[in-house]
Amino acid sequence: MGERAMEPSDFKKWRKSLDMSQKDAAQALGLKRRMIQYYEKGERDGDKVVIPRSVRLACYALTEGVEDYHGPNRKIKRREDKPKKDREKEVDDAAPTST
């Protein structure tokens, strides 16, 4: 069965749709930042780079809010499952500061 690979431009659109930097995407996917750059460029040292299925599926999971998975019958860690103090800190960090 042939599979359609994720295009480099689609990978970059995915990252930007989640408002992630390359560093953020690398951390979320468990990759080095350089791999994110290769995936977005579509090549490494002149050779074509294919985004692996595992990375594509991880991108989908992150899009759906899943941050971690520990197996069946265990709670899925989602972005909204962060402890309240962590969510409040994110809101505080995102709030504009007036000077």
Image: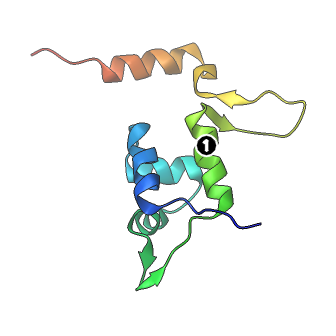
Task: Name the residue carrying label 1.
Answer: 60
Image quarter of residue 41: bottom left
At x 64%, y 21%, the residue is 81
Rendering coords of residue 88 (x, y %): 45, 14
Instruction: Tell me if 73 is positioned left or right of 4 in this view.
Output: right
Residue with the most extreme left position: 99
Q: Which amino acid does label 1 sit on?
A: Tyr
Of all residues, the one furthest to the front in this rendering is 1
Q: Is residue 74 above or below residue 21?
A: above
User: In x, y percent, where is residue 45?
Assistant: 41, 85
Residue at position x 45%, y 53% from top? 10
Quarter of the image with the C terminus in it: top left
Q: Is mark 1 on a helix, strand or loop?
A: helix
Quadrant occupied by the N terminus: bottom right
- Depth check: 93 or 26 in front? 26
- Give residue 64's quadrant in the image: top right
Quick one: 40 or 35, which is closer to the camera? 40
Q: Viewed as shown, does residue 63 lie left or right of 72?
A: left
Coloring basis for residues: rainbow
Q: x%, y% of residue 72?
A: 88, 36
Residue 63 rendering spot, x and y as whole percentages: 56, 36
Name the residue at 48% across, 61% down. 7
Q: Report whether 71 appears left or right of 13.
A: right
Give the residue at the far bottom of this rendering.
46
Residue at point 58%, 51% (across, down)? 29
Asked whether, in this view, residue 55 is left or right of residue 14, the answer is right
In the rendered view, would you say 2 is above or below 57? below
Within 10 angstroms of label 1, few (less than 14), some, or many (20 or more) residues? few
